[in-house]
Amino acid sequence: MKLKMLLKNNYSIIFILLLYLLILIKNALLVGFMHHSNHFGYHLFYGASFIGFRVFLELFFITFIFSFSLFFKKKGRYIYPFILYIIILIFSLVDMIYCRCFQGAPSAYWLFKDTGGEVEGNNYFLDPSIYVTFLDILFFIDLPIVIFMLIYGFKKELFTYNKYNSPVICSASFALLLIGSVILPKESIVSTNTEKQVASYTAFGYHLIDIKDSITINKKAKITNKTLTNYDAYQQLLKDDELNATDNLNAGGVLKDSNLVFLQLEAIESFLIGSKINGKFITPNINKLLDNSYRFDLYEQVKNGNSSDCDILMMTGMLPTNKPITTVHFRDSEYHSLAEELKKENYNTLYINASKFSEWGYQNVETKSIGFDKDIYDIPGDKRTVGYVADEHVLDLAYNEILKLKDNKFYTHIVLASSHFPYPKQSEFFELDTKGMGRVGNYINWAHYVDKCIGDFVNKLDKDGILDNTTIVVTGDHGGIHKYAPHLANKEAKKYSFIGNSSDYTVPYVIYNKKLSGKRLDVIAGQVDALPSLAYLFDLKFNYKNGRILMGRNLFKTNLNYAYLANGILKGKLTKKEKKILSKCYDLSDTLIRGYYFNND
């Protein structure tokens, strides 16, 4: 009887405290999922750790947004926090599904972006059949209890409506929020990592802050003396590394004056190269190139711009900006690019991409900012794959364009898209037996189709004699099945071990030329290291008044063995001093691009 009276007399407090607790638990769930290696499982350590010191900041934030309920009268005072609870619940689930698609929390910057033209998008992401799991019911399991308590409280008139000094309470809770932001470790609050931002402010708070940031997203970054000091230290460390290392292959300048064909493949991962499925090679044509190639396996370093970020990494040697999409929001920023350097050596430069109307805004940057002489997006052909013109048509056009350029040195950059997610089954393109492997099998078949197109293309160049003095680079723009459906990849890896684990996937970087001897270089590296290494082979100096300007290192002359991923994780090992300097790579590149540092160089 006493317990019943206690509950009745304190029903309002119990209801609000329950909402507090449930929001904290949901945030811990969200953080645990987001920090899991593939976002489909739960990372207990991270989930529990955010019930630790960050709980104070979360409590202060929840108190602040809940305090506005005191301005409401009667039922509105409790309906308001219930609505907030529902909004946070929805945001949490949407953020979780989005994170499984794109490895980060969604941002409102899409609402404020301008690609400079028409956008043609694909609507295959956020597919519930792929991205919703049984564990997601944990976000909703308490909802019936909360609804029952709200209705029961109103029906039995258990809620109290005492008068409070609402402005004072709101101000006090806001002050607590500011104090919490100052007291807690800065890197947990001021972070370019969306997972950390969600952890500190809850999903709802993250989106409020994100909206504010997105409205001012194009604001020019201030390049301070500290930025330049950090940049100098970063470049000096990489310069010293190259000076103190030995090139055992004597590769410097070996490809000077060679033509260059750069094949940027959609979502092709390293495990596909050289592997067999049911007795047949997945990439037999790329395999043939390996006997005359230098091969690396690079960790993916793209961010929100996905494929367009790969353009920035491969062509400019810079890392993409942290939160906006580099090619969309900072299309007026200039770069010292591969195209620019080769033009100084009298190369004709051409960019080809089947994504005519893309949300990534390629058409605004390839000639203006990155420096190509010409770019082509209108590609004829009746075959379509995942909404794009089939790769065979793209390479047919590329071949015809190269024929026009063959009497002079040329650099042709070709972006292929047939192996794009979600890897639907299109039997007319499939040749390998992957029965029972589902979407993973489809992915493997699409890779086989892309390889076939490349084989036909290379054979035509060889037949015409163009291949004799042409270097072909083959790389993946970012991860594929391990990136977008890691739970499916890991499941099939139990039967087919060559698929590997989703926590450690890489993309291939193959540099082919008839004069090279085949060599696979086992060094831990990222995509940002691709351009400095290729420039070394072509004897391109990238000398500017501001000194060394590439963010990566020359993999033919390095004693370092590392790569920083987009989420801040370090692959490989560094000394404490090296970590302090090199861990700033993304933030430095972000500031330099947003500050238009190279525009007047």
Image: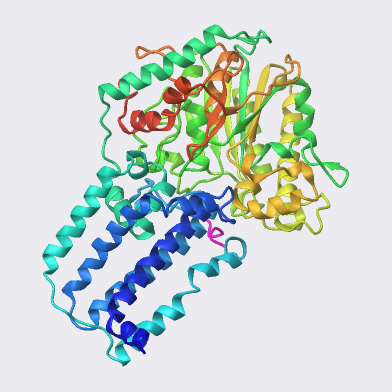
Q: Position of residue 485 (x, y in %)?
A: 63, 53
Q: Position of residue 321 (x, y in %)?
A: 40, 37
* Main SS of residues in magenta: loop
User: Is residue 121 visible in the rendered structure shown here?
Assistant: no
Residue range highlighted in magenta: 122-128
The residue depicted at 72 percent of the width and 17 percent of the height is: 468
Please, is residue 463 above or below residue 515 in the view?
Answer: below
- Residue 465 location, quadrant: top right
Viewport quadrant of the N terminus: bottom left
Extreme right residue here? 279
Q: Position of residue 151 (x, y in %)?
A: 35, 87
- Residue 160 location, quadrant: bottom left
Please, is residue 119 above or below residue 585 in the view?
Answer: below
Left or right of 31? Residue 226 is left
Please, is residue 51 above or below residue 596 in the view?
Answer: below
The residue depicted at 39 percent of the width and 13 percent of the height is: 547
Left or right of 170? Residue 478 is right
User: Is residue 170 visible in the rendered structure shown here?
Assistant: yes
Left or right of 63? Residue 122 is right
Magenta span includes 509: no
